[in-house]
Amino acid sequence: MDDFQKLEQRAYGYLLLVNILTLIVGILIWMYADYSGLPATTAFGLASIGMAAIVVITSRIASTFILQPLRVLWQAILHVSPETVNIPPPNIEKLRFGHELVLSLANRVYQFASQQGAADMADHRKAVLQAVDIVNLFPQPLFVFDKEQVVTNASTSALTYLDIESNELFGKKLFDSVDLEFSTSQTLEKWIVDCQQNKVTDQAFWQRVRVNMKDGKTVKQCDVAAYYNRDNASGTEFIITLSDHSEVYGQDDQALGFIALAVHELRTPLTMMRGYVEVFEEELDGKISPELTDYLRKLRISTDQLTAFVTNILNVVRVDENQLTFKLSESDWKTVLGQGAASMLARAQVLGKTITFKVDENLPSVAVDPVSITEVINNLLDNALKYSGESKDIIVTATLNKEDFVETTVQDFGVGIPENVVPNLFEKFYRNHRTRNQFGGTGLGLYLSKAIVTAHGGNIWVKSKPGQGSSFTFTVQPYASLADEHKNSDNDGITRHAHGWIKNHSMYRR
């Protein structure tokens, strides 16, 4: 006879005994009531009530007793289940009813769970080892982070590329071991924080990221791709890869350096040329024909354009080397805007276009370096004139925005910019492939403008639609908002440097 049949017979006998005892108790109650001389109906009522109470009590005791083996088995299953925690194993030895059956079944449950757990552990260990091998053998520098931003794994090529040992990288945050500098204020570190606060999955890409090696002398340049997946089952939330382009980007930098050396030699003759043109305009005013006067004005405009080109080239080199210095002083924005746009007004007149200024009254004084901020104004107006097409109107507006920054917009109604081009406009050397053969340019003006505006503590962006024109907007800070910084600086103003490469969250150095 098996354990289940034994349990079944014992349960039958137990219930039969309970029912017999209940019947006997009921008869005894009726006999007592009848012996006491009570009326028959009363005696019968008391016997019925007594038997009902006995049935309720014995049923409760019987159900608890009979179901005890099932309860112990239920606890054993929950104890080994991966979905439950803090469930202790049952004490089968104390079980008086169904002990043999429950002991046999519980042992089988534990055996199955042990085998399944071993299989799952083996599969998990195998999957982990495979993932580690994939990361180690990945041909490009690759880093794996957890939710604490701690590096848990990296490819062998990453260690070779950075020339560091694994113990210098693993178990630490990437930024504690690797010195990355970005060409925009949207750095990898900021992206990571944004992902953990606002995203479930995301990816990002950066070009021309500089990697400062630990020897303090070598600088490599690469593109960075980043991927995020919140609460990944493997514990991996971030994967970062580097694509080295040191040779290509280095050649660009060398070419720019050579160009800067060449244009530097143009500064002296250009300065002399501008001086002669100004003398001719003053001395010959009203003495030559209108046609010659127009030629002289066009010569001055061309000289100003060439001077702006030379200045842009030299300043981009200074930005990359963090040698471009700004002296922020308190200025009236309407005056700065008018003086900065003076040369472009003459050029617009020659081209038959009109620049209209809409500047709000009572704007607060701003903290700007007038010389450098003029380059921003000229670059944006130069683009507006260049890409305005058949449209003759260019509008410059200046207002105080919700963040209490002075916000200036240069709007044209020309060819516009495709949506897929907009994210790259402020990168160095970038030119729209659809229009670069039609319009001249170096791809440096907007890059330099962003560096200057950023160093001023502002921001710059663009809105555009093909065929409808573009609106370039930038902000500068009111001087009052920099009162504390002014107190800590010299009396001549606030000195800052243009960071061509943004590290961590720093936007400028004092």
Image (cartoon, helix red, strand yellow):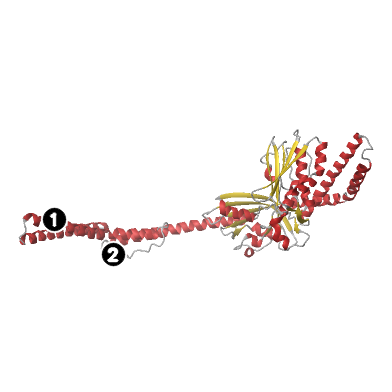
The answer to whether residue 436 shows anywhere in this view is: no
User: Looking at the image, is 470 positioned above or below residue 32?
Assistant: above
User: Looking at the image, is 433 positioned above or below residue 333?
Assistant: above
User: If you read the primary sequence from the N terminus, does the residue marked by circle 2 or circle 1 appear first?
Assistant: 1
Q: Position of residue 203 (x, y in %)?
A: 60, 49
What's the residue type where badge 1 is placed?
Ser
Q: Which residue lies at the image location 23% right of the left edge and 60% below the top edge? A: 61
Between residue 164 and residue 431, name the one nearer to us. Answer: 431
Tell how many labels: 2
What residue is disc 2 on? Answer: 95
Mark 2 to mark 1 CA distance (whole Å) = 35 Å
Q: Quadrant of residue 237?
A: bottom right
What's the residue type where badge 2 is placed?
Leu
Q: Which residue lies at the image location 15% right of the left edge and 60% below the top edge? A: 21
Seen as rendered, the residue at the extreme top is 390
Residue 48: assigned label: 1
Q: Quadrant of residue 505?
A: bottom right
Q: Quadrant of residue 481?
A: bottom right
Secondary element under disc 2, as helix, strand or loop, is loop
Between residue 349 and residue 80, name the one nearer to us. Answer: 349
Q: Quadrant of the C terminus?
A: bottom right
Q: Position of residue 138 (x, y in %)?
A: 62, 54
Q: Position of residue 475 (x, y in %)?
A: 70, 49
Label 1 neighbour load within 10 Å: few <14, some 14-19, many 20+: some
Secondary element under disc 1, as helix, strand or loop, is helix
Seen as rendered, the residue at the extreme front is 362
The answer to whether residue 203 shows anywhere in this view is: yes
Q: Is residue 155 left or right of residue 358?
A: left
Q: Is residue 148 left or right of residue 178?
A: left
